[in-house]
Image (tube, helix red, strand yellow):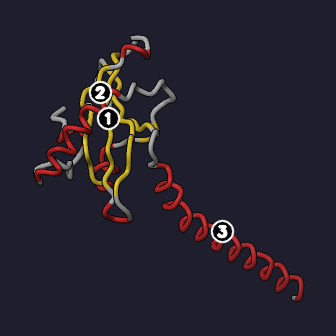
């Protein structure tokens, strides 16, 4: 009878350990996912039959739940060389909720776009912000870019 108690005690210990590990991983996962949205990271958007689409996070403004992401939206026709990317939207300010709703995962490693077009769009957005009329996307990238 004693061996049964020891066997069930070992089983119970393993089950508790598995539960503790699972809780630890689930508590850490959101932090890992949150840390991945950093400047110069690239994220996949839903593709079309003829082109791949993604966005590049350029800057992050604010803290916590009030963070605002400044991104460029890009596309590349399938089969074309990486240098032939198209700037669909040079600059977009977007909330974190809308950004997370838009992306489908990390984009494959590609050459990052040149910053000149982004900088021009961001400069125009800053002027609108100073006037109190700067647009901020709160739905999704595809809706705000009208794609």
Determine the CA span between mark 3 and mark 2.
46 Å
Q: Is residue 137 left or right of residue 83?
A: left
Residue contact at pointers 1 and 2, CB within 8 angstroms:
yes
Identify the residue shown where x is 32% and y is 24%.
Answer: 75
Residue 56 position in % (x across, y down): 39, 36
Picture quadrant of residue 48 = top left
Q: Secondary structure at mark 2?
A: helix
Q: Secondary structure at mark 1?
A: strand
Q: Quadrant of the C terminus?
A: top left
Q: Nearer the viewer, residue 8 or 124?
A: 124
Give neighbour class at mark 2: few <14, some 14-19, many 20+ (Cα, 10 Å).
Answer: some
Nearer mark to the viewer, of 3 and 2: 2
List the residue tagged with mark 1. Answer: 72
Residue 26 position in % (x across, y down): 54, 65
Nearer mark to the viewer, of 1 and 2: 2
List the residue tagged with mark 2. Answer: 117
Q: Nearer the viewer, residue 135 or 120?
A: 120
Give neighbour class at mark 1: few <14, some 14-19, many 20+ (Cα, 10 Å).
Answer: many
Identify the residue shown where x is 83% and y is 78%.
Answer: 7
Residue 110 position in % (x across, y down): 48, 25
Identify the residue shown where x is 82% and y is 86%.
Answer: 5
List the residue tagged with mark 3. Answer: 21
Determine the CA span between mark 1 and mark 2.
9 Å
Identify the residue shown where x is 39% and y is 25%.
Answer: 114
Give neighbour class at mark 3: few <14, some 14-19, many 20+ (Cα, 10 Å).
Answer: few
């Amino acid at each position: 009878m004693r061996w049964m108690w020891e066997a069930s005690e070992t089983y119970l210990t393993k089950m508790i350990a598995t539960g503790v590990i699972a809780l630890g991983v689930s508590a850490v996962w959101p932090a890992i996912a949150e840390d991945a949205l950093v400047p110069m990271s690239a994220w996949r958007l839903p593709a079309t039959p003829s082109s791949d689409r993604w966005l590049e996070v350029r800057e992050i403004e604010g803290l916590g739940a009030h963070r605002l992401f400044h991104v460029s939206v890009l596309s590349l026709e399938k089969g074309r060389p990486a240098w032939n990317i198209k700037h669909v939207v040079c600059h977009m300010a977007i909330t974190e909720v809308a950004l997370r709703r838009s992306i489908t995962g990390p984009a494959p490693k590609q050459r990052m776009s040149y910053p000149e077009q982004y900088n021009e769009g961001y400069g125009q957005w800053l002027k609108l912000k100073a006037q109190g009329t700067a647009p901020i996307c709160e739905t999704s990238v595809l809706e705000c870019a009208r794609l």
